[in-house]
Image: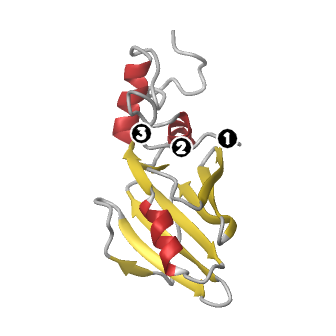
Amino acid sequence: MSAEIPACAAGDDATAANGVVLMAQSVPTAAWVPCVENVPVGWTFAGLDARDGSARFWLDSDRDGARAIEVRLSGGCDTRGATEIPSELDDLRRYERVTQVSPQYLGRRYYVFDGGCLTLVFTLSGDNRGEPLALATQSLGVVSREDLATQVHDASGGRLHLDPPAGTEGEGDPP
């Protein structure tokens, strides 16, 4: 588990943080990878966990508790029972399913795209439920796999690739 914020743009060169690259490598089919644009006041980044086939990170809230927002990246998702809503993100279809409104506001927001799904799981227990969800989700962004591949290639002087070249997976390090 990593404590480094998976920032959309970090450092002097404003490139995606290593955690974003790690998430992309965990879900090699995903055309888009979630990242953090900024951490709103009252929220803290709680950690990132990336495994083969999925990745996730959490945001804690001073009002809504630990892991109030969980952001998951996977190769796909089940949106049955969710309502499609116009998406604020180009090339991503948005769905929402609220499962409980009181005493906690619980649900999932899905962004579906080529090769993957970004799921926001929200567990909000504060008084103004819609406001923290909007604030937290406005702080999130996405980076295209294409941009991440270019970033890795450029940062390594062409030696490394985000995704292994075809036919080299499992053959060890490239020469």
Identify the secondary structure beneath mark 2.
Answer: loop
Residue 93: x and y, percent?
A: 35, 67
Separation of marks 1 and 3 at Cα, in angstroms:
17 Å
| Residue pictured at 65% horizontal, 72% vertical | 64
Question: Mark 2 packing: few (<14 Cα in 10 Å), some, or many (20+)?
Answer: many
* SS state under label 1: loop
Q: Quadrant of residue 120?
A: bottom right
User: Which residue in the protein does label 2 denote?
Assistant: 6
Q: Can residue 115 be seen from the camera position used here?
A: no
Residue closest to the eye, 138 or 24 = 138
Looking at this view, name the residue that lies furthest to the front.
41
Regarding mark 3 in the picture, which secondary structure is present there? loop
Numbered label attached to residue 9 = 3
Query: What amino acid type should be assigned to the residue bearing mark 3?
Result: Ala
Residue type, mark 1 in image = Ser
Q: Which residue is mark 1?
A: 2
Callout 1–callout 3 Cβ contact below 8 Å: no
Amino acid type shown at disc 2: Pro
